[in-house]
Each structure stands twice: as C-alpha cells, then as structure tokens.
Image (cartoon, helix red, strand yellow):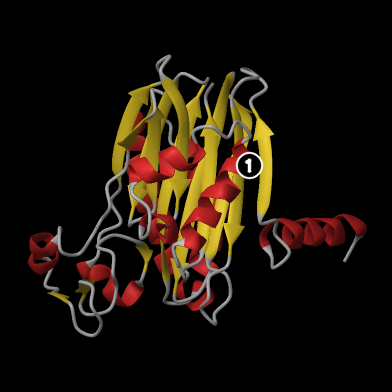
C-alpha cells in the first residue's frame, strides 16, 4: 500500500468511522450571514450510534449549494453511513437537477435505494430514514424526506414544517395495497408488518415489498422573514413540538450552539434515542 492509499484510508476513517466528529460549524462563502452548525448525541440504547449527518457548503456548476442531511439508521449504521457518502452525489449527478429538481431528487432517492438493496450482503438488512435540504445560492430551498426525521423553517418566529412524517398509521392503505399490514403489536406504536415504526425508508430489504422509499419533496424560495432551518432526527420531535423547538433557539445566534441547546432540551425531556440536529441560520 503506497503513501497516498494510506492517507486516503486515514481520511475515510476520520470522516466516516467511529472517530467522526459529533459537532461542527461553517458558513456560506457567497453570503456570509448564512451559517450552519450541527450536534449529535448517542442515545441510551446498547447499540452503536446509528445517525450520520451532512452539513456543508460546496460550489457546483457556478452555484453555491448548502448540503444538509440527517440519516437515522436502524438495525445497524451501515445504510445511514452509505447515504452520507452517496446520496447527495447521486442527486447532483442527475442531468435534470437544475431544471426539474423535484423529479431529479425522486429518481436519485430511488437509485440510491436500489444500490443499497443490491449491496445487502455488505450493508446488512437494516435501513435508514433521511431528511435532506439543499440551499441553492441562499435563495431556493429544496427539502426531501423519507421517514420521520424532520425539517422545520422559522419565519418571523413561527414554525413551519417542511417535511412529512411517514407514519405507518397515516399510510396504512398504501402499505396494505402492497400486501403488508400495520400493527401496534408488539409495542405501543404502529409498525409496518409489526416491525418498523416508519412507513418509508431506505434499505430494509425484508420489508421493502411493503415499504416505500419515495420521498416527499418541497421547494420554497427563501424570503426576508426566514430566520433559520432546523433538521433533526426523531429523538427531538418525540418530545418537542415544532414551535417549542423554534422557541428554544430563536435567540441563539450561533448555529452550532443552537443545535447543541436543542438536543439538551430534548434530553431534559427524557429523550432516549440517538439525536442529531442541524441548524442553518439565514439571518
């Protein structure tokens, strides 16, 4: 193995292995007032941390893109890790991304799910939810999601949910049309085939015939009254409403500090799940 290969392996381990950072921050080079920060905390379960995040700005085709995502894995972290390193690449490879953004993202989600299912021996039979946000030149925001990680926009102090929680009880008819069923047993929450508590996800090969990976996509223009965006896994939304989350951090100007504070709020309310949070301040 030559020196470059060794260095590459070290970089991969640092970025995506057990030593991956659990907090970080950055800002737009195009619009200096747009900043972002993320924070992650492992829950009380015995398994390893299953969440992964993307939180960065990059230049693509003479545009500046803010790329933000929360991937909340289940039954192992390999699928969420794969999404962290591949989903945005697949989205940006779509030739129609700039003109037909919504359909391009849907195709990229589908293609990525096919890749995961094709690699089930390597990645395992687990899965992951996802919420992604692409901020284009600070002006247009494209949010997509499968599962129950959520994106919320604060406008003039008011919370506006940008994603859709894919709960089995809400998609019961769709699941049944696919030949599956929704049951509260075992446990106390509705689950697809009595197993998975979300109606859409990447991976989950054993349930895929009954489980969709098609995202809901929302495109909005960023207006002057838009203050900040929150992306977070369900460890926050199980214990905080959208407005409670907005109110908790609306006066914290540092995006990284805001993300950490929001997680602290969820922990104070006895959230036991892995929690990942990204805050993007637009003012």
**Residue at figure coordinates x 35%, y 41% from the top left:** 243
Please tell me whether residue 163 is drawn above or below residue 2 in the rendered image.
above
Q: Which residue is mark 1?
A: 256
Quarter of the rendering occupied by the N terminus? bottom right
Q: Specify whether residue 89 is in view.
A: no
- In the image, residue 108 lies at what x, y percent? 40, 45
**Residue at figure coordinates x 37%, y 53% from the top left:** 240
Quarter holding residue 128: bottom left
- The residue carrying pointer 1 sits among few (fewer than 14), some (14 to 19) or many (20 or more) residues within 10 Å by Cα, namely many
- In the image, residue 87 lies at what x, y percent? 49, 49
**Residue at figure coordinates x 48%, y 30% from the top left:** 228
- In the image, residue 125 lies at what x, y percent? 42, 77
**Residue at figure coordinates x 45%, y 74% from the top left:** 120
Q: Nearer the viewer, residue 63 or 195?
A: 195
SS category of the residue bearing label 1: helix
Q: Specify whether residue 272 is in view.
A: yes
Q: Is residue 76 left or right of residue 97?
A: right
Please tell me whether residue 39 is drawn above or below residue 117 in the rendered image.
above
Q: Residue lying at the far bottom in this picture: please name it.
A: 186
Q: Nearer the viewer, residue 237 or 169?
A: 237
Q: Nearer the viewer, residue 43 or 30?
A: 43
Q: Residue lying at the far right in this picture: please name it.
A: 3
- In the image, residue 15 lies at what x, y percent? 71, 56
Disc count in the image?
A: 1
Quarter of the rendering occupied by the C terminus? top right
């Amino acid at each position: 193995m030559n020196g470059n290969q060794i260095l590459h392996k070290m970089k991969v381990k640092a970025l995506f292995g057990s030593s991956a950072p659990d907090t970080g921050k950055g800002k737009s080079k195009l619009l200096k007032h747009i900043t972002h920060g993320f924070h992650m905390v492992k829950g009380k379960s015995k398994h390893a941390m299953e969440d992964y995040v993307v939180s960065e700005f990059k230049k693509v085709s003479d545009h500046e893109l803010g790329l933000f995502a929360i991937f909340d894995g289940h039954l192992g972290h390999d699928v969420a890790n794969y999404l962290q390193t591949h989903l945005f690449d697949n989205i940006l490879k779509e030739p129609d991304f700039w003109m037909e953004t919504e359909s391009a993202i849907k195709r990229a989600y589908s293609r990525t799910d096919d890749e995961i299912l094709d690699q089930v021996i390597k990645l395992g039979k687990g899965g992951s939810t996802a919420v992604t946000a692409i901020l284009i030149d600070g002006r247009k925001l494209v949010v997509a999601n499968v599962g129950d990680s959520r994106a919320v926009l604060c406008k003039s102090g008011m919370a506006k949910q940008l994603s859709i929680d894919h709960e089995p009880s809400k998609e019961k008819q769709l699941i049944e049309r696919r030949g599956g069923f929704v049951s509260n047993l075992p446990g106390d929450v509705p689950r697809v085939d009595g197993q998975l508590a979300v109606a859409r996800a990447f991976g989950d090969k054993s349930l895929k015939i009954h489980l969709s990976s098609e995202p809901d996509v929302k495109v909005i223009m960023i207006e002057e009254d838009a203050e900040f965006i929150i992306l977070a896994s369900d460890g926050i939304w199980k214990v905080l409403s959208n407005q409670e989350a907005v109110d908790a951090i609306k006066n914290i100007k540092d995006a990284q500090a805001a993300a950490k504070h929001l997680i602290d709020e969820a922990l104070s309310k006895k959230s036991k799940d892995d929690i990942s949070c990204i805050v993007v301040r637009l003012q």
